[in-house]
Amino acid sequence: MAAAASSSSTESPETTTERRGIPGAQFVEDVETYLSQIGLDVNSALAFLQERLQQYKLVEMKLLAQQRDLQAKIPDIEKCLDVVATLQAKKGTGEALIADFEVSEGIYSRARIEDKDSVCLWLGANVMLEYSCEEATSLLNKNLENAKASLEVLIADLQFLRDQVTITQVTIARVYNWDVHQRRIRQTATSSTAKVS
């Protein structure tokens, strides 16, 4: 019996897959076998699937927020790299660099930047450190590579999650339609036995 259940057509290698903590959804070919395997009635199975769908939607919202943060972070890092490159290009020429910088939202100030061998970078949590221009470029390039790699992984996670949402929605529809079909069969059988007697 266990061997028959494990070789059932409702299970595939993809049913147990998981990606970074996101459980894989099981595609259901035979609803009756699926219900007997999980040991639930139709209403309980539908409730379980709806709950799983809501969990997927919650994870999707979190991943989309992370994606927006990374998509905002990458241009900031690139802008910082451009500024450091400009400072390095002006270094040694003897001419000062005039720059407008944002002090606060909507408030700008003009600065005259003389030849300097170092820059200060905000690291977050109100922490700023001074780096040489070469170290700053190296750190920013590393951060940019990490952010782009994280974004790629996040996009793959979102695609996997969307696939799981689709599979779960199809499964909900199949279970519901199977239940409606079974009720019609029972109703037809009941009405035909009532007519015979």
Image: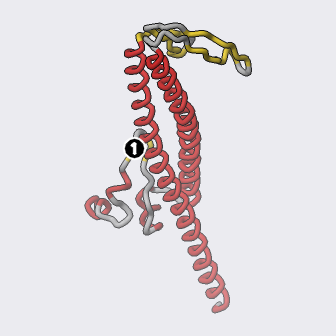
User: Where residue 79 appears, x then y in whole percent?
Assistant: 53, 27
Question: Is 149 rendered above or below residue 52?
Answer: above
Picture residue at 43% right of the left edge, 23% below the top: 140
Does residue 147 appear to the left or right of 184 in the view shown?
Answer: left
Residue located farthest toward the front when viewing the structure as drawn = 94
Picture residue at 47% right of the left edge, 24% below the top: 81
Q: Nearer the viewer, residue 82 or 128?
A: 82
Residue located farthest toward the left when viewing the structure as drawn = 3
User: Where residue 29 appears, x then y in whole percent?
Assistant: 43, 68
The image quadrant where one finds the N terminus is bottom left
Q: Nearer the viewer, residue 72 or 184?
A: 72
> Residue type at mark 1?
Arg
Q: Nearer the viewer, residue 164 or 135?
A: 135
Question: Is 175 rendered above or below residue 163?
Answer: below
User: Where residue 196 appears, x then y in whole percent?
Assistant: 63, 92
Picture residue at 44% right of the left edge, 63% below the top: 28
The image quadrant where one finds the C terminus is bottom right
Q: Which residue is mark 1?
A: 19
Picture residue at 61% right of the left edge, 17% below the top: 99
